[in-house]
Image: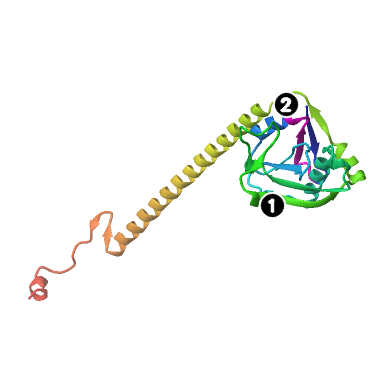
Amino acid sequence: MVFYFTCLSDPKYVIYCGRDKFENEHMIKWGWPEDVWFHVDKFSSAHVYLRLPNPGQSYKDIPQKIVDECCQIVKDRSIKGKKEPAVDIIYTPWANLMKTKTMDDGTVSFKNRKHVELVKNVARDRPFLAKIYKTMTDDLTVDFEKQRKDRDREERKKVKEAAKKQEKEDREKRKKALEDKKARDYDVLFDFGVTSDGPKECEMEPDDFDDNFM
């Protein structure tokens, strides 16, 4: 079962977490590049994910209120962590998670520790947590693999459409540049006294040639 939460401060953000380590494992494999992973530091806990609304958004730009919501959930969903007065929470982009074959289900490491953020001394806020849980829903039928493949297919479609649009704009720019060049060349022809009817007739009299070329 997957649990979903809608962020109180901005409903465009979605928080979700799995029921057990096996669902955690599935989410590790089929997470999205837009996902940010949260976990209690030095204690076991649920893997909580925050899905960013914009693909290009950095995990460093998450509003603090939303970080606080995720921290409250992940602390509460840690058997040992929820009993502690305060715990530290770590979070990092899904793409920074590293999984090897020797690791147990639900266990991860990091590709680069520099991309791991630390929130220190997170204490339980009961009134705040109660409001968060009012947004919670569960889903027994979620298919993470299908969701990820559908997402990737949609992203490829957007990339192709953007490429076609750019190609069309480039063609129009080249066409406009060629038309401008033709217009400039046409103006130059007139500057040199050349018309569409051909060169102007010479106004010199035949006898003038001898005077001019002696």
Q: N-terminal of the two: label 2 or label 1? A: 1
In the rendered structure, the answer to whether residue 97 lies left or right of residue 177 reads right
| Residue lying at the far right of the rendered structure | 127
Among the 4 quarters of the image, the one containing residue 131: top right
| Camera-side residue of 20 and 160 | 20
Q: CA distance from mark 2 to mark 1?
A: 28 Å
Q: The C terminus lies in which quarter of the figure?
A: bottom left
Q: Which residues are magenta?
A: 10-21
In the rendered structure, the answer to whether residue 127 lies left or right of residue 97 reads right
**Amino acid marked by disc 1:** Lys
At which x and y percent is residue 60?
Answer: 69, 52
Tell me the residue at 54%/41% (across/down).
162
Numbered disc 2: secondary structure: loop
| Residue at the disc numbered 2 | 142
Among the 4 quarters of the image, the one containing residue 106: top right
Residue 84 covered by magenta stretch: no
Report the disc number at residue 60: 1
Residue 17 covered by magenta stretch: yes
Label 1, residues with CA under 10 Å away: few <14, some 14-19, many ≥20: few
Numbered disc 1: secondary structure: helix
Whether 154 is drawn above or below 180: the answer is: above
**Amino acid marked by disc 2:** Val
Tell me the residue at 66%/41% (across/down).
109
